[in-house]
Amino acid sequence: MGSSLQEANPTQATPVETAVTIVRRRADRRLITRVVRTGGTSGWEGAAGSGLVACKAGGVSDETNQPAADPPFVRPTGRAGQAYLVRPGENADEPGPGVLVLHSWWGLTPGIKEYCNRLSEEGFVVLAPDLLRGVVPDTAAEAEFELSESDPNSTAALVLASTVTLRSVTEHPDGPVAIIGFSMGASWALWAATRQPESFSKVVAHYGTQHIDFSTLTAQVQGHFAQHDTLVSADDLVEFESDLFELGHEPEFWHYEGTRHWFAEAGHDEFFDSDAAELAWQRTLAFLKR
């Protein structure tokens, strides 16, 4: 992604042990999930119903930015993260396939939460981790500052831990889930699906790319891109698409005339295009349900 207002690109991550604690469902049928990074053992600890699972989140090597084959254990600090989880059904307790939603640098906004709600109404179990620790920037300058203050290692750990949590509450806990990302979140989604291919069956990237080794990627890829984009250049997009095709992937890319970056995110009137956003939604839904 080009320009000085570039959203964070997940290229390096430190392996951590992660414990995920699920807070009880609230009366409004929404579930807030607290993710606490702690020490512990690798693998699964407890059933989904117990509210506690543990996973070992791997990283990438500093030299090559490629997934580390057998990374050493690093004990992190105990800072917590938050996520938004919603399930289908009148009582929000029905099983369904999982979708992990990763927001852009605007944070976990009401618009992203409503997007999760719409997915849930279509039968999906949806989890959206808060990658900005509760901050919802009002301006691009504020968003850029918050990203400069964030730790990509911690974000990577949160993304992978959230994947474990989501999988544990889907209809098939041992199976993969889909992942949807917006801008910065799209880059993280592509990174996660490449770093942990067994966890993801489909990736939907909204105006975000990634330039890493995709040789381990097995998920199907769909992309939605703006016509006028100061963060994703035409060269970025060509390189991204070429990388996938060269490895035998057949990505489904859509381009939206007259749109700009963030066109699919409600609540940002300067960029939001309701017609394009609805079309992208319909295409995403069809892709997820294939």
Image (cartoon, rainbow, N blue to C red):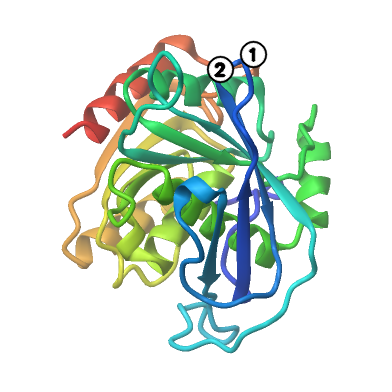
> Residue 274, how many percent across, how many down?
47, 11
Which sits in the foreground, 228 or 152? 152
User: 35 or 61, which lies in front?
Assistant: 35
Q: Residue drawn 36% across and 27% down?
A: 94
246 and 258: which is toward the camera: 246
Q: Are marks 2 and 1 in contact (CB under 8 Å)?
A: yes
Residue depicted at x 43% and y 53%: 235
**Which amino acid type corresponds to the residue marked 2 in the rendered image?**
Phe
Where disc 1 sits, the SS reads: loop
Question: Residue 269 got which mark?
Answer: 1
Q: Amino acid at mark 1?
A: Asp
Asked if residue 79 is positioned above or below residue 22 in the image, the reply reads below
Spot occupied by residue 201 in the image (x, y as percentages of width and height): 27, 51
Residue 169 image-quadrant placement: top left
Label 2, secondary structure: give it: loop
Q: Is residue 48 above or below residue 79?
A: above
The residue carrying pointer 2 sits among few (fewer than 14), some (14 to 19) or many (20 or more) residues within 10 Å by Cα, namely some
Res 23 visible: yes
Q: Which residue is mark 2?
A: 272
Q: Is residue 139 left or right of residue 241?
A: right
For the residues labelled 2 and 1, the Cα–Cα distance comes to 5 Å
